[in-house]
Structures are given as structure tokens and as C-alpha cells.
Image (cartoon, grey):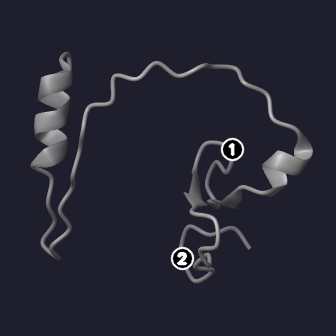
């Protein structure tokens, strides 16, 4: 069944769980964000980002500022 409605998407997301106990919290954010904003190289360098091995331009994790990145992650690019 396609996810045609936000309510349906939220329901599926909120009821996601794993055998190891992962539970998911999801909220709808209707805020409108500006798109196509440009940042300079200095701002980009401040982002705590770790690109994954597979398709690193699309798959990455952004960590909060001051958070130590887990270099042991199977997704981490070395």
C-alpha cells in the first residue's frame, strides 16, 4: 500500500519496532523551510558529518556539535 497520506506514514513510522527493542517516535512538522540555501566552505567544515561507504553523497550521518563520531560504525567511511 503506497504511503499516500501523512497520517498513514506517521502510523507506520510510529508503530515500527525491532526485536532488540528499538522504538520510533515521529511527529509531523508542517514548517516551511527555505530551499537552495548556499553555505560557504567554513560553515560546511563546521558540520559534524560522517559519510557512509555506499553512495557517500546520499548516505551520511550528521552528529550534534561536540559529539564524538563512532569510527567503528560499519557505515563509516575511513
- Earlier sequence position, callout 2 versus callout 1: 1
Q: Position of residue 21 (x, y in %)?
A: 15, 73
Residue at the (67%, 59%) spot, across then down: 49
In the picture of the structure, the residue carrying the numbered disc 1 is: 57
Of the 4 image quadrants, the one containing the C terminus is bottom right
Looking at the picture, tell me which residue is in the foreground, 15 or 36. Answer: 36
In the picture of the structure, the residue carrying the numbered disc 2 is: 73
Of the 4 image quadrants, the one containing the N terminus is top left
Q: Position of residue 52 (x, y in %)?
A: 62, 60
Instruction: Answer left or right for 56 relative to 14.
Output: right
Looking at the picture, tell me which residue is in the foreground, 7 or 18. Answer: 7
Residue 9 to residue 43: above or below? above
Q: Estimate the spatial distance between the alpha carbons at disc 2 and disc 1, rounded to whole Å.
A: 17 Å
Q: Position of residue 2 (x, y in %)?
A: 19, 21
Cβ atoms at labels 2 and 1 below 8 Å apart: no
Residue at the (57%, 83%) spot, across then down: 72
Local secondary structure at mark 1 = loop
- Residue 39: image quadrant is top right
Local secondary structure at mark 2 = loop
Looking at the picture, tell me which residue is in the foreground, 57 or 10. Answer: 10
Residue 11 to residue 7: above or below? below
Q: Position of residue 58 (x, y in %)?
A: 61, 42
Instruction: Answer left or right for 19 relative to 57.
Output: left
Within-10-Å neighbours for mark 1: few <14, some 14–19, many 20+? few
Amino acid at each position: 500500500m503506497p504511503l499516500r497520506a501523512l497520517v498513514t506514514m506517521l502510523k507506520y513510522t510510529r508503530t515500527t519496532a525491532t526485536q532488540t527493542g528499538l522504538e520510533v517516535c515521529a511527529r509531523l512538522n508542517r514548517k516551511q523551510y527555505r530551499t537552495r540555501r548556499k553555505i560557504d566552505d567554513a560553515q560546511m567544515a563546521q558540520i559534524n558529518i560522517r559519510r557512509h561507504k555506499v553512495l557517500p553523497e546520499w548516505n551520511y550521518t550528521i552528529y550534534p556539535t561536540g559529539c564524538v563520531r563512532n569510527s567503528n560504525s560499519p557505515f563509516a567511511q575511513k
